[in-house]
Each structure stands twice: as structure tokens, then as C-alpha cells.
Amino acid sequence: MEYEFVELKQKHIEAWSKELPKAEETPMPVYNGAVVRAALKAGWFKDCKVKPEEVGEMSPAVVRKLAEKIVKEYADLMKVSPE
């Protein structure tokens, strides 16, 4: 399944970040699942039929890849132009 982001706004970032546990206190597989669930709850994806409670039934590799995509998108959005 292909996951495409909506045009993310500040409201999406705020809702997503409020759902995340502290990364340094959370095992990586648990954190990856939390990242994906938070993005689903915050409405990050276009036409996505997956519900947050279904993340636990997904392949760990898919969850990890999706979490990495989400974190990269977040990092890209937070970059400030040097100007």
C-alpha cells in the first residue's frame, strides 16, 4: 500500500507530536508504531483506510519504513531557510 501525505500544516504537526512518547525511553519497535499511529490520528495521509488500532497487525518492516518516512517528512518540514 502506498501512503501519500496531505499538505501538512502546523495543526498536523502539533497533533502528531502530542501523541508521541519520549523516544529515549521507548523501545524502537514501540516507538515506530507510535509514530505511525500518531500520524494516522493526526490526519497525515490522503485517502488512507488504515486505522491507528490496526498498526499492530502490520508487518514490523512496513511499520518501520513508514515511521522513517514520517520522521523524514517532519524533519523536512521543520527546516528553516538560512535567509
Image: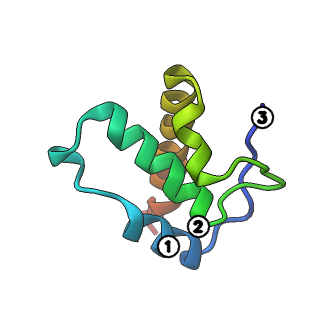
View extreme (right): residue: 47
Residue found at x 24% / y 35%: 27
Relative side of 71 to 21, left or right: right
Residue found at x 49% / y 73%: 15
> SS of the residue at dot 3?
loop
**Which quadrant, please, contains the N terminus?**
top right
Residue under label 2, please give it.
42
Disc 2 to disc 1: CB gap under 8 Å: yes
- Distance Cα–Cα, label 3 vs label 1: 22 Å
Please state the horizontal and vertical placement of residue 64, each as a whole percent of the image: 48, 29
Task: Give the residue type at disc 3.
Answer: Glu
Residue under label 3, please give it.
2
Task: Give the residue type at disc 1.
Answer: Ala
Q: Earlier in the sequence, mark 3 or mark 1?
A: 3
Residue found at x 56% / y 41%: 55
Please state the horizontal and vertical placement of residue 62, each as a whole percent of the image: 58, 26
- The disc placed on residue 24 is none
Q: Earlier in the sequence, mark 3 or mark 2?
A: 3
Looking at the image, is 31 positioned above or below residue 14?
A: above
Relative side of 32 to 28, left or right: right
View extreme (left): residue: 25
Disc 3 to disc 1: CB gap under 8 Å: no
Disc 3 to disc 2: CB gap under 8 Å: no
Badge 1 local density, few (<14 within 10 Å), some, or many (20+)? some
Please state the horizontal and vertical placement of residue 82, each as a whole percent of the image: 42, 63
Badge 2 local density, few (<14 within 10 Å), some, or many (20+)? some
Residue under label 1, please give it.
15
